[in-house]
Amino acid sequence: MWNKMFIKKSSVQQKVLISFCCLILFPLGLFGYVSLKITNQTIQEQVVAAKLKSLGLISQKLDIMASDLTAISNIYFSNEDLRSVLLSPPGDQAYQERTKKQFLNKMIVTYRYAYTWLDYYTSIIGFNGIELHTFYDGGKIGMDALKREPWYDEVTKLNGGVVWVSDPSVKLVPTVNEDHFVSAVRLIKDFENNTIIGLMLINVGESFLYKQYADARQTNEHMLLFDNRGTIVSATEKSQVGQKIETAGYYKQFTGNEGSFNTRINGMETLVTYHKVESTGWTIVFYTPLDTLLQNVNKTKWLNVGLFIVVLLVSVLVSYFIAIRLSIPIRKLFASMKKVEMGDLSERSDIQGNDEIGELAKKFNRMVTRIEELRDRVIEEQEMKRQAELQNLQSQINTHFLYNTLASIRSMLLTRTPEKVDTVIVSLVKLLKKTLSAESEYISIAEEIANLQNYVNIQEARQDELLTVEFDIDERIMHYKSLKLLLQPVVENAIFHGIEPQQGAGLIWVKGWMEDDQICFSVTDNGVGIDSSYEDGNDDGAGTAMAQKVLSSASGMGLRNVQQRIQLHFGDQYAIEMLRPTMGGTTVVLRWPVFMRVEELNRS
């Protein structure tokens, strides 16, 4: 369909423009698009590499933090003084308070300041009811409350191993002074009998975790840290802390130790990079909006788009003017061809030039000149042929007419008075003066009727008053043109083949009128009529078919000449019609176009 539209219905100018767009602008636009895509991909890969490197450094810091906290828990775990405190009798309150105070001053505070970069809080809860908390001296938490937490069974199964837990219990919040924190939790055991004597939690607040990665975040970026249970333990957006990241549709894409992927978050395309902290099972995540990431690329893209539009406009204008220079000569040549097609062989192309179009115009002019010469020659030959045929028909009509008329006068010499014969001869002389003169073969209808009247005078005298011819001619057609001797052969045919074969008086009615820019004449007689063998039904065209049968017979020579003369002058569509009226006899109908001058006839 495109090929059909492009080849058949578009102009040369359109073809040039479309070809330019297809061959130049489209590849240029495609190249720009692919270049931007490659640039975007390259920048994303570079950013992903940089983000993963940054996440690796943050992960190392968190690993160091976890290692230090584990080391601190190991010191507590193996401390003999702590074991003594947790094994003290549960009923001796004074002893417990004194021992607790000594341990806090000696151990917890000392080790608390040994790792100055860490900001942590220690909580030790013994089965004997003793609780040791860094910088907290409030109400007791109670071992029973911690045993009901979901992580306690996991801590028990590890039997002294460290378990990292997010927000282990709301009761521990006052010991940390933060709503959200993480804890390294482990059991404390008596090495002598391997019994569990307490529970130790080393707590780190969310604010300390946030400090470990806050500096790595750039404007409009977002970061978070979630544990192996899918709980967000730290985030730049604090409202997310404590929520489950599993509800996010992209959660399943966190596979492996590190990676990246693109997703839509809150209606914005976002690059997500992540890295897993091996020691704790946490995963730290970078969220980078692509709009921010590709901000400079977008500026370049719009700059390229602007330049492309400018190039497009300039290119279209240049190609448009080039197409005009190519198409105008072709259009002129096409217009000249259309005029020649409509019959104007005087048309010549004025295109100049030495290129292919100029040569084509020159050949076109030579071709039209040759065609015009051939047309003039054919017209001249056809006119000479037509004139020869008309002269031949005219001679046949004149010979036929003179033979019948002179035969009528000869018979009248025996039966009529000299005065009557003289009147007939005068009518014959008038008739011959008009028909045999060298005047134009076209005469007015008024003159044709006058000639017919002279012929009728001769025949009425010959028929001894047994013939009557009546005329009913519309006065409006009298000034229009007709052929000489067009009606006389028809009336003559009616007399000799219609009236004379019957006995008694005969009537011929000649009617003339104008209908649909045509001159119409009918000659009707009440004679013997047409033989039934010539009839061809009463359907449309029956009159023409009947006339063709009569004209093809030997008796139709006079009418045949009339029809041939009409068709030679006016065209084959003007054929004689013959009808049989209901009252009997025969009707012959003639038609030819309305004209007053020969020029009008040629134009029609």
Image (cartoon, grey):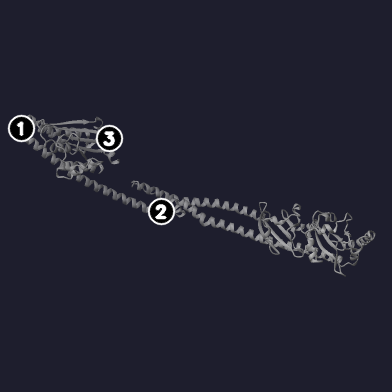
Rendered location of residue 143, percent (x, y): 85, 59
The residue wearing badge 3 is 515
Mark 1 vs 2, N-terminal side: 2
Could you say whether the residue bearing mark 1 is in a helix, strand or loop? helix
Q: Nearer the viewer, residue 190 or 178?
A: 190
Q: Nearer the viewer, residue 534 or 590?
A: 534
What number is the disc on residue 358? 2
Label 2 sits on what residue type? Answer: Gly
Instruction: Tell me the kind of residue under disc 3.
Output: Glu
Residue that lies at the very extreme toward the front in this rendered image: 91
Give me the disc on residue 415.
Answer: 1
Q: Secondary structure at mark 3?
A: loop
Q: Is residue 575 visible?
A: no
Of residue 541 and residue 123, the one placed in the foreground of this image is 123
- Circle 2 packing at 10 Å, graded few (<14), some (14-19), many (20+), is some
Q: Please tell me how crowded label 1 is: few (under 14), some (14-19), or many (20+) other residues with Cα within 10 Å.
A: few
**57 sits left or right of 463 in the view:** right
Q: Residue at x 90, y 67 (%)?
A: 80
Identified by mark 1, the residue type is: Thr
